[in-house]
C-alpha cells in the first residue's frame, strides 16, 4: 500500500514536472531572448585589459549579475536514465546555459544603469546550491561580473562612481533580528518568565497551608484560555512593526498562552478571595449522580471533580455534606481542605487492600 | 572607494600597492524558503529566494572587503574576484578578494 502511494506521488511529480516545467522553461527562454535583444548594444569582453585608446580619465565600476536556476523532476528523471549510458547531459547543460544567459543579462542591465556600453574582463562563477546528500534536485547559481569604465572629471574629489556600501536592509540583516538583542523580544521573554515564576510560587504556597481554596464547579479554563489568546493576538498586532522574526513571534505566543492561562487562574482566585465575604457553612445532600444538591435553593448545585468519584460512590446517597463557601466577584469559592483530607484517608484505606499484605 | 575587475585602469596611475584585501560571508538557506523552493523544484525555473540570498551574500562580502581596504587607507580595489564554495549542506561561502591600491 505504501509502495502504491509512493509510486502515485512519483508519477504525479513527473507529470507536473513535465507539463508545468515545459511551460516555465519556454516562458523563461522567451523572456530571456527579449531581454537579450533589448540589451544587445552593450558589448562584453573577456579580455583582461580594456581598450587603452579610450581618451580621458575613467572611473571603474564593478557590475554583477546572478541567477539561480533549478530543474524540474521530469528532466532529472530523464537525466538519471541518461547516466546509465553516459555521454553529455543535455538537461544540465540547458540548466547552466540558461543561468549563464540570465546572469549576463542582469550584468548588462547593471552596466546600462551605470551609463556604460562596454563591460570588460567578464568572469563567470558557478556554484551548486542543492545538497545532493539530501536528495535535492540540481540548482545552480551563476554569477557574472565585470568592470565598466565611466568617463569622469579629472578631479580627485569626484566620488560619483565610488562604491556605496550596501545598507543593512540590502544585506538582509538587521541588528534587531537577533532575538536576544531585540528589546521587544527580551521584554516578552522576561514577562513570560515572571509569570511562570508567579505560577510556581502560587502552586507552592497552596501546598503549604491547610486552607485549600478552589473554584466551586471548577475553574473557567476555557474563558482563561480564550482571554490569554486574545491578549497574545492583540499584543502581537500592536507590535507588528517591530523587527522580530515571525518564527520568534510564534514561539513567544505559544509560550505565553499556557503561562498566562495558569496565571489568570491564580489571579482570579486571589481576586475572588479579596472581594469575598465571610466563610459560611453550606449544607448539601449527596445525589445519585454524585452531585451535591444544596438545601438552600439560592446556592448552585455542586459537581465536584470526577477524579474523586470513587470516594463519592462509596458514600451513602442522601448523606449530608457540609462545605465552607464564600462568594466573591468571580463566583463561589469553597475550602477544599477538609474534603481533601477525607479523600486522602479514603485512598489510604484503599491502597493497602490492593497492594496485598 | 573604486572597485574594478581590471588589473589596471587606463589613464590612471597607481601611486601605491597596499596588498590583498578580502571579505567573505557564509550564508545558509532559510528553512521556510527552502520548503517553498522544494515546491518550485517540481516545475523548475528560477528560484528567486536563492537568487536574493546569493545577492545579499555577495553584497555583504563586498562590504567587508571594502571595509578592510578603507582601514588600509586605499582608495581603489583592483582585480576583484569572487569565489563561491559550498561549505556544508545548504550553506555557501562567497569570498571577494582584490588588490588594494592608492590611485592618484
Image: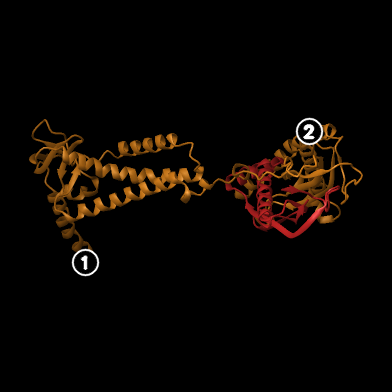
Task: Decide: few, some or many residues near mark 1? Use Cα within 10 Å; few <14, some 14-19, many ≥20.
Answer: few
Q: Chain of mark 2?
A: A
Q: Marks 1 and 2: same chain?
A: yes
Q: Chain of mark 1?
A: A
Residue A85 in the image: above or below residue A165: below
Q: Is residue A345 left or right of residue A58?
A: left
Q: Are marks 1 and 2 in contact (CB under 8 Å)?
A: no
Q: Nearer the viewer, residue A196 or A203?
A: A196
Q: Secondary structure at mark 2?
A: helix
Q: Secondary structure at mark 1?
A: loop
Q: Position of residue A79 (x, y in %)?
A: 79, 49
Q: Is residue B57 visible?
A: yes
Q: Position of residue A152 (x, y in %)?
A: 80, 40
> Gap in Å between the C-alphas at discs 1 and 2?
84 Å
Quadrant of the image occupied by residue A44: top right
Q: Is residue A131 left or right of residue A248?
A: right
Task: Decide: few, some or many residues near mark 2? Use Cα within 10 Å; few <14, some 14-19, many ≥20.
Answer: few
Q: Nearer the viewer, residue A144 or A54?
A: A54
**What residue is disc 1 on?**
A356
Q: Colour of chain B?
A: red
Q: Earlier in the sequence, mark 1 or mark 2?
A: 2
Residue shown at 76% from the left, 48% from the top? A142
Q: Position of residue A161 (x, y in %)?
A: 74, 41
Q: Position of residue A355 (x, y in %)?
A: 23, 65
Q: Is residue A309 left or right of residue A240?
A: left
Quadrant of the image occupied by residue A108: top right
User: Which circle marks residue A31 in the picture?
Assistant: 2
Q: Nearer the viewer, residue B75 or A305?
A: B75
Chain letter tied to orange: A
Q: Nearer the viewer, residue A178 or A55?
A: A55
Amino acid at each position: 500500500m505504501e509502495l502504491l502511494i509512493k509510486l502515485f506521488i512519483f508519477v504525479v511529480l513527473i507529470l507536473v514536472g513535465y507539463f508545468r516545467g515545459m511551460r516555465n522553461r519556454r516562458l523563461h527562454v522567451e523572456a530571456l531572448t527579449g531581454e537579450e535583444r533589448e540589451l544587445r548594444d552593450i558589448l562584453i569582453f573577456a579580455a583582461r585589459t580594456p581598450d587603452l585608446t579610450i581618451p580621458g580619465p575613467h572611473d571603474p565600476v564593478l557590475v554583477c549579475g546572478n541567477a539561480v536556476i533549478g530543474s524540474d523532476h521530469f528532466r532529472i528523471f530523464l537525466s538519471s536514465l541518461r547516466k546509465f549510458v553516459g555521454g553529455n547531459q543535455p538537461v544540465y547543460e540547458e540548466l547552466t546555459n540558461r543561468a549563464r544567459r540570465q546572469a549576463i543579462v542582469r550584468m548588462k542591465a547593471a552596466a546600462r544603469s551605470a551609463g556604460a556600453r562596454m563591460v570588460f574582463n567578464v568572469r563567470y562563477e558557478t556554484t551548486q546550491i542543492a545538497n545532493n546528500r539530501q536528495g535535492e534536485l540540481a540548482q545552480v547559481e551563476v554569477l557574472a561580473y565585470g568592470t565598466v569604465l565611466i568617463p569622469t572629471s579629472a578631479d580627485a574629489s569626484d566620488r560619483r562612481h565610488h562604491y556605496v556600501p550596501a545598507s543593512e536592509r540590502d544585506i538582509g540583516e538587521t541588528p534587531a533580528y537577533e532575538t536576544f538583542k531585540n528589546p521587544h523580544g527580551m521584554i516578552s521573554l522576561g514577562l513570560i518568565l515572571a509569570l511562570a515564576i508567579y505560577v510556581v510560587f502560587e502552586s507552592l504556597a497552596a501546598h503549604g497551608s491547610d486552607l485549600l481554596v478552589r473554584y466551586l464547579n471548577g475553574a473557567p479554563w476555557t474563558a482563561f484560555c480564550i482571554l490569554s489568546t486574545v491578549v497574545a493576538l492583540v499584543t502581537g498586532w500592536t507590535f507588528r512593526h517591530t523587527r522580530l522574526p515571525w518564527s520568534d513571534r510564534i514561539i513567544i505566543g505559544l509560550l505565553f498562552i499556557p503561562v498566562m492561562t495558569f496565571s489568570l487562574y491564580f489571579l482570579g482566585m486571589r481576586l475572588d478571595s479579596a472581594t469575598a465575604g465571610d466563610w459560611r457553612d453550606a449544607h448539601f445532600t449527596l445525589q445519585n449522580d454524585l452531585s451535591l444538591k444544596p438545601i438552600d435553593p439560592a446556592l448552585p448545585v455542586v459537581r465536584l471533580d470526577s477524579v474523586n468519584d470513587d470516594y463519592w460512590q462509596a458514600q451513602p446517597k442522601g448523606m449530608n455534606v457540609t462545605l465552607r463557601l464564600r462568594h466573591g466577584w468571580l463566583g463561589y469559592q469553597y475550602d477544599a481542605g477538609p474534603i481533601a483530607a477525607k479523600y486522602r484517608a479514603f485512598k489510604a484505606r484503599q491502597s493497602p487492600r490492593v497492594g496485598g499484605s | 572607494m573604486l572597485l574594478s575587475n581590471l588589473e589596471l585602469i587606463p589613464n590612471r596611475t597607481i601611486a601605491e600597492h597596499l596588498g590583498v584585501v578580502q571579505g567573505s560571508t557564509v550564508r545558509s538557506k532559510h528553512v521556510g524558503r527552502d520548503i517553498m523552493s522544494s515546491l518550485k523544484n517540481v516545475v523548475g525555473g528560477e528560484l528567486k529566494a536563492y537568487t536574493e540570498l546569493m545577492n545579499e551574500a555577495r553584497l555583504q562580502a563586498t562590504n567587508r572587503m571594502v571595509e578592510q581596504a578603507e582601514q588600509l587607507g586605499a582608495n581603489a580595489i583592483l582585480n576583484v574576484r569572487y569565489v563561491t564554495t559550498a561549505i556544508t549542506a545548504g550553506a555557501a561561502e562567497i569570498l571577494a578578494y582584490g588588490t588594494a591600491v592608492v590611485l592618484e
